[in-house]
Image: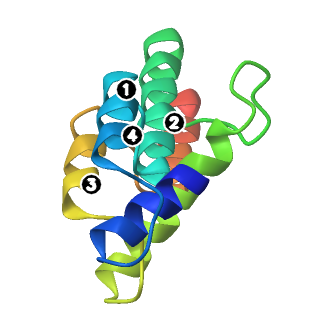
Amino acid sequence: AEQRKQYRLRKLGKPSNMSDERVRLLNHLGFTWQAQCAAWNRHFNDLCSYKEENGTCLVPLNDDKYPQLGLWVKEQRRHRSLMIRGKHSHMTQERVDILNSIEFCWDSHEASWWDKFKELQ
């Protein structure tokens, strides 16, 4: 966190102990400057694995193998809803497109209804 803070200060032209050499060394290690993006990508990769294993993006909130994934999926739906309504959101059109590329289910209630309906047939 401190490295990111110093890097931001440096980019803003404020006093910072982050030198060009330190930036180069951290980049060489593959340091992630935007932790939030890295976390999103990590969860997305987990979702891809979950879908490959289970055939769906409908992740329960209490999955044993991916304990945080269900909440993350729920948050993606919430942030997309906020984005659509023009409210502050971490969702971007790029993320929507990425999630759509794996057939992400935006309305879990609708999907659940159709699953139950198919069971009745």
Q: Nearer the viewer, mark 1 or mark 3?
A: 1
Q: According to the image, label 3 marks what residue?
A: 96
Rendered location of residue 102, percent (x, y)? 29, 32
Within 10 Å of the Cα at label 1, are there few (<14), some (14-19), or many (20+) other Cα atoms?
Answer: few
Q: Nearer the viewer, mark 2 or mark 3?
A: 2
Label 2, label 3: how far apart the Cα atoms are: 14 Å
Task: Examine the rendering and report whether any part of residue 1 can be seen.
Answer: no
Q: Assess whether mark 3 and mark 2 are in contact (beta carbons under 8 angstroms).
A: no
Label 2, label 1: how far apart the Cα atoms are: 19 Å
Q: Under tag 1, what secondary structure?
A: loop
Front position in the image: 49 or 43 = 43
Q: Amino acid at mark 2?
A: His
Q: Which mark is residue 43?
A: 2
Residue under the image location 53 percent in, 20 percent down:
50
* Residue positioned most to the top: 53
Rendered location of residue 11, percent (x, y)? 29, 68
Residue under the image location 48 percent in, 58 percent down:
17
Within 10 Å of the Cα at label 3, are there few (<14), some (14-19), or many (20+) other Cα atoms?
Answer: some
Q: Nearer the viewer, mark 1 or mark 4?
A: 4
Rendered location of residue 59, percent (x, y)? 60, 35
Q: Under tag 2, what secondary structure?
A: helix
Q: Which mark is residue 30?
A: 1
Q: According to the image, label 4 marks what residue?
A: 22
